[in-house]
Amino acid sequence: MIGIRAYNSGVRYGVDRSIDFLVDGVTIKKSDVVIIAEERLDQEYKTAIAQHDERLIELRMLPFHYPFLFLKNLKGTSKVDIWAALWNTLLDVCPLKHYVVYNDFTDLSTVRNGVLGQRGCQTWFYTHACNVANRFVHTLKDIPPKYILNCQILHYDHLIAWNRQIANHYIKCGGKFRNVHVVGCLWGQCNNGVRLTRTTKEGQ
Amino acid sequence: MIPPTIGIFTTTPVDYLFGQLDIDAFLTDIKALYYPYIIKEKHVLYPTVEQVLNQCDIAISCPFTSTCINALSSGIPAFWYDPLNKCSDSDYHGTPFLYVGKDGLRRGLEYWLGKSDQEVRAIAREYGNIIDPFCDGEAKQRFRELLL
């Protein structure tokens, strides 16, 4: 099972890019995927997920649905303890093999990734755009300290990057990744859907 | 002669990198070419990136929005245009993907217009470390296969 992180201000279902872009029905089917809401999703988003016939698990609801499991996993009352208990409960009810995220610079992501790692789930951070890396192509001194701090939070098993420059950027800023995969531009297309009858040199 | 249609892609202004003044100059210079154009404003839903790319002959983007790499990976001529020379010390300086100033804008158009899908992909692959080493539209599939 592959978990995909969803959040309100992130990508939803669109023409160009969708939260479930990994689902192609052949290599990865809808039944292989579960959308994980780490925050309270708005109703519109939840309706869209239901309309796409995809499974949604809301982390904050787990203590209500599985109170005994949650209490069994709860080791303390701090924010970190509660977060770890939520993720352990999730893994009890839905064993994930992979967890896929982008743009997650939250401090609790390290807690989550620690729990997932202990339970045998691989964590994946993919770069959904190049502008962040390319805007700071200069030297480290040009990069706002807040951004470097954000990157230092990144501890994942895998980084998926469009090109080597983007991968190096995340590493240079302090991100820790066990494996780095350069796969090309995730939104690039084959000829399907791309206009082919472009102006030619002869036509100029 | 059919004039080329330009797909214009703006970015979120960030003052110390590429601010509103830069974006205004970017738009003014491209519009002054008097070519037909379609604008995709950042954070505006329609037209979508795909719709604009499907209808344009060349994509010109503010540095360094992803749409340029998106277009090049799809075989569509594209470059970033930096009207006020804010990005001259970037990794893209001296490559065919970044042009500076009005003269640069014209040189960029001359260089890219008329290039075929295959030619565009070949140039982008040549600079694979900073663009896309594959340019084959199979990045999503490569990601999927890693998850198997």
Image (cartoon, coloured by chain):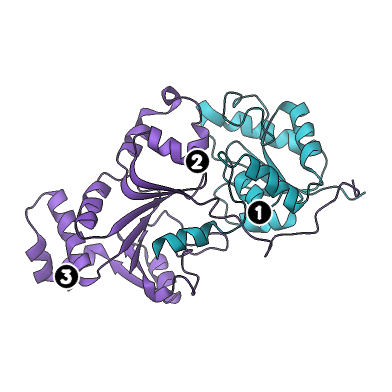
Chain colours: A purple, B cyan
The kind of residue on which mark 1 rests is Ser
In terms of image quadrants, where is residue B126?
A: top right
Chain letter behind tag 1: B
Q: Residue at x 45, y 41 (%)?
A: A167
1 and 3 marks in contact (CB < 8 Å): no
Q: Which disc is residue A156 wearing? A: none
Q: Secondary structure at mark 2?
A: helix
Q: Which mark is residue B74?
A: 1
Q: Quadrant of the C terminus of chain A?
A: top right
Other residues around mark 3 within 10 Å, as few (<14) / some (14–19) / many (≥20): few
Residue at the disc numbered 2: A164
Amino acid type, mark 2:
Arg
Q: Nearer the viewer, residue A64 or A195?
A: A195
Q: Marks 3 and 2: same chain?
A: yes
Q: Quickly name the residue at label 3.
A: A64
Tell me the element at label 1: loop
Q: Height in image: A105 above or below B94? A: below
